[in-house]
Image: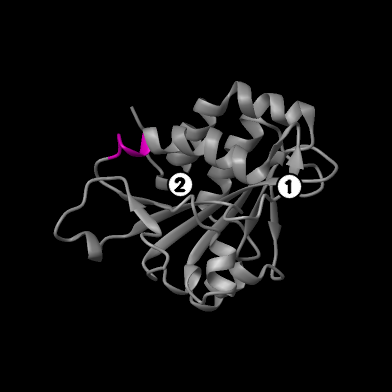
Amino acid sequence: MFGCLFAQTSSTTATAAKRHEYLIVMGHGAGDPGARGNGTTEATFLRKKLLPHMEKYAKRVKNRDIKFYSPKHDIVKDTLVYHKGSYKIHKNTSVVMFHLDAPYGHGGHVIIHKRKPNNRDKRLAHVIKKYIGLNRAYNGYSFRTNLRNCNVLRRRGIDYSLVESGFITSKRDYHRLNKNIDKIAKAYLEAIINEKIK
């Protein structure tokens, strides 16, 4: 019914099942456009603009198992409606989900699964600060327990971060995202795996 939800990007070895995996998820999609602004939607921007650049850099990573959640699917719908999605993610996985904020404001932040950010959260927030700017309301991070899909990950003990890369309704944020999209994608991926990509 769903086909392949996870697309393998980095090289696979015989011990891949035992290694830590990184799953990158573009938010919304599959009929859910997400937020709207600047002539596009959250789902479209993430899939058409950010995803191709992240996939390009993921192919250069040889010693990490990086997967992308199928852009034809919405992990929230797969999880909450079909009891798949986050219920099917292996526990030896770090999940990083990408979104855009709305309706008013500017700057991004990282939604975290513990009260204090881990090192990956800090690296992701640094990318946002450098290329887009941080949302002053959160100063880089927000601890949330009211996101249903994230709560499934939390209950299953799966490590995750949800990245709000700025406001899709903000002309300033949208301009910075488009201007720096390739650098942002590379920096995000480096932040996730904690290594430099050539």
Q: Secondary structure at mark 1?
A: loop
Quarter of the rendering occupied by the C terminus: top left
Residue 57, relative to residue 90: is it above or below?
Answer: above
Q: Mark 2 or mark 1: name the one nearer the start of the chain.
A: 1
Q: CA distance from mark 2 to mark 1?
A: 24 Å
Q: Where in the figure is residue 160, as x and y percent of width and height?
A: 52, 60
For label 1, the crowd category at 10 Å Cα-Cα, with few meaning under 14, some 14 to 19 and many 20 or more, is some
Specify the amino acid type for callout 1.
Ala
Give residue 92's position: percent from left, percent from top: 36, 67
| Label of residue 192 in the image | 2
Residue 196 visible in the snapshot: no
Spot occupied by residue 119 in the image (x, y as percentages of width and height): 51, 51
Left or right: 152 as drawn, with respect to 63: right
The residue positioned farthest toward the top in the image shown: 179
**Residue at horizontal 79 percent and vertical 37 percent from the top:** 169
In terms of image quadrants, where is residue 45? top right
User: Image check: 15 left or right of 61?
Assistant: left
Q: Is residue 83 magenta?
A: no
Look at label 2 and name its amino acid: Ile
Closer to the camera in the image, 194 or 15: 15
**Residue 53 locus on image (x, y percent):** 45, 32
Question: Of tags 2 and 1, which is closer to the observer?
Answer: 1
Total numbered labels placed on residues in the image? 2
Residue 146 visible in the displayed image: yes
Q: Which residue is mark 1?
A: 35
**Residue 126 position by quadrant:** top right
Q: Which residues are magenta?
A: 57-61
Relative to residue 109, is residue 56 depicted above or below?
Answer: above
Q: Main secondary structure of the magenta part?
A: loop
Q: Secondary structure at mark 2?
A: helix
Taking depth in this image into account, of 129 and 75 the one nearest to the observer is: 75
